[in-house]
């Protein structure tokens, strides 16, 4: 546990200090970092508060609460994860600040045409979902679990715990943001922001501890994760590792139903 804290602290320090070497200068980098932090933290905190207000009035998936909600602790952990994400986002922001080109483009032509946008994004989604699943499986190994344990302190989570993960896990999750800083890594902005916004909303829902009948009836048909599915991972950390989709749990037999069937 102690060594995990040391690694996490050093990693966060390195991410913050890297800004000293930003080609646009430290002032531009740390200004961009502050903007990125506020710009990401605000919608996540407001979204988490709204989702929690609704979800706490509904029937809880794990029944009446037996433990405290840990709202402040999870909000604080989430802000630390947002700081890590902002450290990556500050690099493309710093380039935008000085009008240097980035990978973010606003027209389909600049993104390489309609087929490139459709198939490029579909391929990226498949690769990213596989990465999220295997990253999560790796974090449940004996070696890496110390970097994931804090997230499982929220056994019956609220939406404030949606991004309450340590620095190592945050780096493994958010590093692709830095690709936006490279002009060759073309991202079609409307689709990119739509997908990122969708992922944030999904993650708030996955951790709210309650369900919406309409959402639960729709998302599994698309292979997308749901609150009912992910909540089981918080109740029983040995099943349901998917973060965006549930496809890899079905393929690898880590779906709770498959695990139960093997035991009987
Ligand atoms: Zn986990």
Image: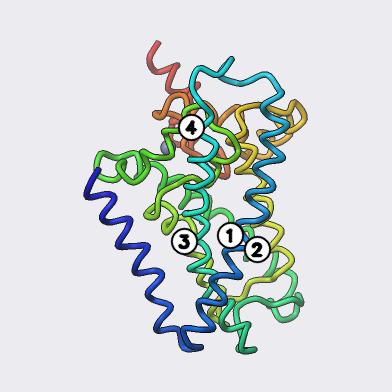
Image quadrant where residue 19 sits = bottom left
Q: Residue furthest front?
A: 72
User: Which secondary structure lies at badge 3?
Assistant: helix
**Label 4 sits on residue:** 240
Residue depicted at 61% across the width and 76% down the height:
186
Quarter of the rendering occupied by the N terminus: top left
For label 4, the SS is loop
Rendering coords of residue 252 (x, y %): 43, 35
Image depth: mark 4 or mark 2 in front: 4
For the C terminus, give its image quadrant.
top left
Q: Earlier in the sequence, mark 3 or mark 1?
A: 3
Q: Earlier in the sequence, mark 2 or mark 3?
A: 3
* Labels 1 & 2 near each other (Cβ < 8 A): yes
Compared to residue 178, the image places residue 67 above or below, namely above
Q: Is residue 42 above or below residue 253?
A: below
Q: Secondary structure at mark 2?
A: helix
Circle 3 or circle 1, nearest the eye: 3
x 67%, y 27%: residue:
56
């Amino acid at each position: 546990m102690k060594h995990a804290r040391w690694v996490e602290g050093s990693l966060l320090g390195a991410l913050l200090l890297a800004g000293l070497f930003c080609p646009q200068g430290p002032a531009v980098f740390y200004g961009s970092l502050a903007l990125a932090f506020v710009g990401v933290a605000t919608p996540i905190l407001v979204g988490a508060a709204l989702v929690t207000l609704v979800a706490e009035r509904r029937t809880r998936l794990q029944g009446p609460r037996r433990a405290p909600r840990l709202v402040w602790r999870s909000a604080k952990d989430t802000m630390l994860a947002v700081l890590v994400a902002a450290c990556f986002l500050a690099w493309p922001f710093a380039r935008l600040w000085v009008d240097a080109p980035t990978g973010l483009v606003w027209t389909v032509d600049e993104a390489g045409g309609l087929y490139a946008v459709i198939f490029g994004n579909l391929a990226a989604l498949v690769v990213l979902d596989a990465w999220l699943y295997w990253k999560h499986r790796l974090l449940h190994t004996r070696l890496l679990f110390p970097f994931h344990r804090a997230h499982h302190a929220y056994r019956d989570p609220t939406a404030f715990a949606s991004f309450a993960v340590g620095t190592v896990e945050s780096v493994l999750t958010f590093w692709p943001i830095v690709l936006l800083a490279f002009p060759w890594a073309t991202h079609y902005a409307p689709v990119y922001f739509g997908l990122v916004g969708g992922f944030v909303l999904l993650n708030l829902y996955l951790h709210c501890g309650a369900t919406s009948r309409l959402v639960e009836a729709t998302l599994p048909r698309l292979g997308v994760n749901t609150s009912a599915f992910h909540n089981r991972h918080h109740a029983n950390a040995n099943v349901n590792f998917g973060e965006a989709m549930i496809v890899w749990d079905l393929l690898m037999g880590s779906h709770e139903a498959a695990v139960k069937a093997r035991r009987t």
